[in-house]
Image (tube, rainbow, N blue to C red):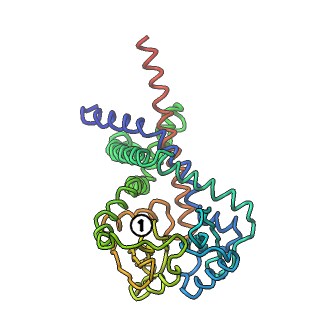
Amino acid sequence: MSRRIVLWCKLHRWSSLACTVFLLLLCVSGLPLVLRADLDRWLSGNGAGPAPAVGLEQLERMVQAAERLHPGAGVTSASIDEDAARVSLGLVPKGDGEPAEALQLRFHAASGELLTGQEQAWKGFEPFMDLLFSLHTDMFAGLAGALFLGAMALLFLVAIVSGVLLYGPFTQKLAFGTIRRERSARIRWLDMHNLLGIVTLCWALMVGVTGAINELSLPLYQRWLAADVQPILAAWQGRSLPPRGQAAPMLDAVRAARPLMAGQTLARVMSPGDVSPWHFALMVHGDTPQTAWRYDMILVDAQTAAQAERVPMPWYMVALVLSRPFHFGNFGGLPLKLLWCVLDVMTIVVLGSGLCLWWPRRRASAKAKA
């Protein structure tokens, strides 16, 4: 065996071993996350597929319904999840009294009806999925956990590339897909490992790269705020802040932003204080399948809703936003998500078979040294 192949073998073995446990964690936790929106709609009784974009008139009816249910509170934030066919509205009590817990109501994105069906099942599902998402993204360790998992994703890419370089020399005398069933269990595991590894190659590379990019979401978002949003806010320093619960109506902020939303649709409205203490922050994206990945921010004066300013998304945020649908497979409907699940399970087998190949050899080596 040439020195080059020995070097690639060592690189593949140790890069794989360093990240295998964490990749197994990511694969297992990511499996239900791929189907999160579909499970969400099913458990909440919220229809069979994504809803069309929510217009201002429809959002206005939802806001009015929410404020009728809670006359002492006002809607200050909104989140439109088209995949889950759901609109979430955040309400805070009006006035300057003691801070009270914010309320949240959810409506069907297509019909505008308040979601109450299968409430207990759905309420148990959402916290569990949030917990699973946190485990998948940062292992409950915040930025440090995210960066660590990003490093594991990079090691995974090293293992994939080194594995591809080893695939040819080790399988050149075998027909593609051969499983030598007459040989030992270790040889059968090796053949299965090689076959599934090469079948999932392109998918694993894509998920590894997009996963590493996703782990940088917080630093990239903070850089966007510091580089593009903070210079705008510098001109507002020293201005009075709207009293708690007495900002302009959220719908007025949406109306003020409409002239800046040509060819885009509303995705989220953040309350004053989330991005800027002086502004509502609206996230908008393209209104066609070809432009839906393109997001921008619009800042609207929270006191008068009379002034709006657009903050375009820089290239590194575009890369981040583009990486998310590719990572979870949520850009081609349920059939593509099911394919992602199959490839995920195959990757789990690749990782598990790698351990099965390494552990017996390690034990045999330890016995020989003893």
* Relative vertical location of residue 204 with respect to residue 264 in this rendering, above or below: above
Q: Position of residue 114 (x, y in %)?
A: 69, 76
Q: Residue at x 61, y 73 (%)?
A: 86
Quarter of the picture holding the C terminus: top left
- Asked whether 312 or 65 is in front, the reply is 65
Q: Is residue 61 left or right of residue 10?
A: right
The amino acid type of the residue labelled 1 equals Val
Q: Residue at x 58, y 75 (%)?
A: 75
Q: Position of residue 89 (x, y in %)?
A: 59, 72
Residue 140 percent across, percent down from the top left: 51, 46
- Dot 1: within a 10 Å radius of its alpha carbon, few (fewer than 14), some, or many (20 or more) residues? some
User: Label 1: which residue?
Assistant: 275
Classify residue 342 as left or right of residue 111. left
Q: Confirm whether residue 294 shows in the render.
A: no
Quarter location, residue 36: bottom right
User: Percent from the top left, x then y, of residue 64?
Assistant: 64, 83
Q: Image point 40% across, 87% down: which residue? A: 262
In the rendered image, the vertical position of residue 335 relative to residue 307, given as above or below: above
Quarter of the rendering containing residue 358 = top left
Q: Secondary structure at mark 1?
A: loop
Task: Indicate left or right for 285 with 183 as reference.
Answer: left
Nearest the viewer among 150 and 62 is 62
| Residue lying furthest left | 3
Observer able to see residue 26 = yes
Q: Quadrant of the N terminus?
A: top left
